[in-house]
Image (cartoon, rainbow, N blue to C red):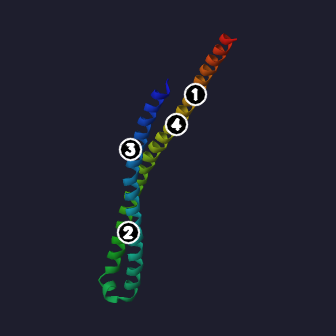
Amino acid sequence: MTPNDLESLLEIARARHDAAQAKLQPVIDEERRLRKLLGDLAKDEEVGQLTLEHDMAIRSVRGDEAWLRWVGRNRRLLNMQLASVLARKEAVFREAQATFGRVDILQTLVRDARLKSVRNSQKRAMAQILELHLLRS
């Protein structure tokens, strides 16, 4: 395979790697958003607990139980969504890793092919110089 062929393959591999990286970013953004929502929910739960401890009117109509059920339901929902996003992230991340490996290998092959081409050119030039030198002698 010529260095030009390898460089063409490298360009394709880089494009695939860039596409895989582009797929990863929205998944990471979604993970951040869900983690933030879980953090906000935990803060709201703390504030709610403090409020419920001192508000007998809410407790008398079982508002505290409704609040705790709402928090629990939302936490479960957010955790399920997060688990789904993390599974998607794992799959997309593996794809990105594989494309990076291909790019890395092709870069090495292109570098080696260029070096081989330069060495072959040097050998041919040296052979021509020796041939000219022998013809003059």
Residues 41 and 76: in front is 41
Looking at the rendered structure, the kind of residue marked 2 is Gly
Q: Residue at x 59, y 23 (%)?
A: 120
Q: Nearer the viewer, mark 3 or mark 1?
A: 1
Q: Position of residue 76 (x, y in %)?
A: 38, 63
Q: Is residue 19 placed above or below 82 in the rendered structure?
A: above
Badge 4: how crowded within 10 Å, few (<14), some, or many (20+)? some
Q: Position of residue 60 (x, y in %)?
A: 31, 85
Decide which of tag 3 and tag 4 comes sooner along the chain.
Answer: 3
Residues 104 and 5: in front is 5
Circle 3 sits in a helix, a strand or a loop, which is it?
helix
Q: Residue furthest left?
A: 61
Circle 2 sits in a helix, a strand or a loop, which is it?
helix
Decide which of tag 2 and tag 4 comes sooner along the chain.
Answer: 2
Q: Which residue is mark 4?
A: 107
Q: CA distance from mark 2 to mark 1?
A: 68 Å
Badge 3: how crowded within 10 Å, few (<14), some, or many (20+)? few
Q: Which residue is mark 2?
A: 72
Q: CA distance from mark 3 to mark 4?
A: 18 Å
Q: Quadrant of residue 53?
A: bottom left
Tell me whether the residue at label 1 lies in contact with that at label 4, contact meaning CB atoms closer than 8 angstroms.
Answer: no
Circle 1 sits in a helix, a strand or a loop, which is it?
helix
Q: Which residue is mark 1?
A: 118
Looking at the rendered structure, the kind of residue marked 3 is Ala
Q: Which residue is mark 3?
A: 19
Looking at the rendered structure, the kind of residue marked 4 is Gln
Q: Residue at x 49, y 38 (%)?
A: 103
Looking at the rendered structure, the kind of residue marked 1 is Val
Q: Nearer the viewer, mark 2 or mark 1?
A: 1
